[in-house]
Amino acid sequence: MSIVKKYLLNEVRLKILAIALAGALWLSMTYVGESKIALSVPVSFNALHRNLLIRETDTKDVLITVNGPLSLLKSLSAKDVKVLFDLSRVREGRHIMTIQKGDIVVPTGVKIEDVKPDYIVVEIDKIVEKRLRTIVKLDKKWIGVYDVSSWHPRYVEAEGPKELLEKRDYVETLPVDGDFSRQQEVLDIPLNTKSLEVKKMRPEAVRVILRRSEK
């Protein structure tokens, strides 16, 4: 074989080797090399006693920094990571709960590096039942046009946070409104439970009878 042919053959072999090495390096960086990312993950709770409820938390999400192979991190999203607190031993009151690595679930091969904040504040309240008086609230544009003739029931059973229900003895309906034209209107109007944060209301609406005002 001539010197020229040997030279060209060696050049080709070197080029093939260079490409192979470059490919191996790329694979190493992609599938073996490690990196880190930060994800905003919602906090969730379980095992809370049925007579208790969560009134408030100071944060709904925590920032978790994880590291691991790029092959895993490339497709990792917040839904693959869970921050889960076991509340089976928690009682009513204000609790400062440290976020431990054991509270965080990540895919195999991914490691937890940092959590911010590293604690959350949770307000737990007792669930109580209370009988509340119902009040019908007429939309202001119908005041003087229609009168509330009657409504039923006059009382409902509410189930919700002790702290809030202890301070309330009534619940209003949503504003009574509609396309009214008859002498008498009969409607089922939902109760406005938003401000009460109730867990249950029985029933959730009242039957209201309106009569056109004679004034």
Image: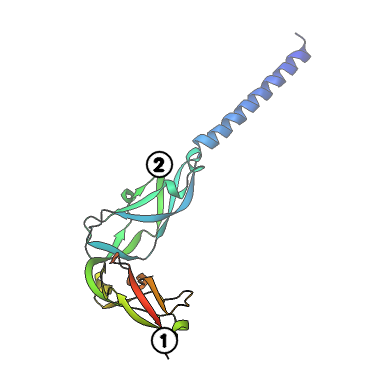
Determine the residue positioned at 22% across, 68% down: 129
**Between 108 and 199, which is closer to the camera in this rendering?**
199
The mark found on residue 107 in the picture is: 2
Instruction: Count every numbered label the image shows and give the total.
Output: 2
Determine the residue positioned at 41% across, 57% down: 62
User: Does 52 sit above or below residue 111?
Assistant: below
Using the numbered discs, state the Cα–Cα distance from disc 2 to disc 1 in whole angstroms. 67 Å
User: Does 2 sit above or below residue 112?
Assistant: above
Determine the residue positioned at 71% across, 20% down: 12
Which residue is denoted by mark 1 in the rendering? Answer: 213
User: Which percent across, then down, holds residue 208?
Assistant: 35, 75
Corner quadrant of residue 44: bottom left
What kind of element bears circle 2? Answer: loop
Residue 168 appears anywhere in the view: no
Corner quadrant of residue 127: bottom left
Bin the neighbour count of mark 1 within 10 Å (Cα to Cα): few under 14, some 14-19, many 20 and up.
Answer: some
